Amino acid sequence: MPAAGKFVTLNQGTYRLVRRIGTGSSFGTVWLARQHRQSSCQEVALKFVNDRLLHDATPAEAARWRDVADGEKTFLEQMSPWDGRHIVRLLDSGEDRGMPVLALELMATDLSEVLAATKQAGKTIPVQLTLSWLQQVNHALARVHDRGWRYLDLKPANLLLDSTHKCLKLSDFGSNRSVAMRPEHSFVGTPGWQAPEQVIDTGTEHSSRHFYTDARAD
């Protein structure tokens, strides 16, 4: 299981875990890790499948989580060559204990943390900064849609910020659904942050739950 000091070897190098820094999704954990080279030390965010949940998961649940991680990897690989369009960058990938691991560029914080800290301090976000964030989110979503995907999990915790809080990048692409596929899919997203069509079940009483979305749901 992930623990501080552990070394994880992926396709492009070996990384030493420093500390857990958050959750990437309901079944993911994210660690700060360092890759030491001869003349440099690069810090990255390593995203694992949650070890505790994996221990108690059924084979079907574990297979689904693998599919989600593989889907996120596939999407981010499509961003190559990288154009810096407000989407967190995939740096490396591989496996640990038979499950996918992603090495992502490390950002300083996320929008949910910034909003909570601002509220606690009794302050407000400047209008121009808010407009800049909105523009960057729109650029990221346009990139997702241009590549033929629906994002379907837009929320402050998935919007990462650099140390200046000026550069914003979209993260956590495990909920992506391809536009080329049928619009019908299983339940996806975070309750409270979804478009109506993401929570309205169109299935019948005796059938699987069906939801219909397209890029407009984002």
Image (spheres, rainbow, N blue to C red):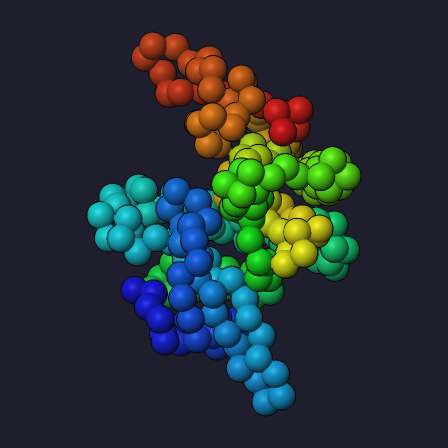
- The answer, for residue 41, to whether it is visible in the render is yes
Does residue 3 appear to the left or right of 46 in the view shown? left
Percent coordinates x, y for residue 54 in the rendering:
29, 51
- The answer, for residue 67, to whether it is visible in the render is no
Does residue 98 appear to the left or right of 77 in the view shown? left
Percent coordinates x, y for residue 81 in the rendering:
74, 59
Name the residue nearer the viewer: 134 or 29: 134
**Residue at left offset 48%, top offset 32%:** 189
The number of callouts visible is 0
Q: Quadrant of the N terminus?
A: bottom left
Name the residue nearer the viewer: 172 or 123: 123
Which corner quadrant of the image does residue 173 belong to?
Answer: top right
Does residue 182 appear to the left or right of 211 in the view shown? right
**Residue at left offset 54%, top offset 18%:** 197
Q: Outermost residue, left direction?
A: 56
Does residue 128 appear to the left or right of 61 in the view shown? right
Percent coordinates x, y for residue 99 in the rendering:
38, 58
Name the residue nearer the viewer: 93 or 43: 43
**Residue at left offset 56%, top offset 22%:** 195
Query: In this picture, is 16 found above or below 194?
Result: below
Q: Outermost residue, top direction?
A: 205
Q: Quadrant of the C terminus?
A: top right
Q: Outermost residue, bottom direction?
A: 38
**Residue at left offset 55%, top offset 53%:** 109
Percent coordinates x, y for residue 93 in the rendering:
52, 64
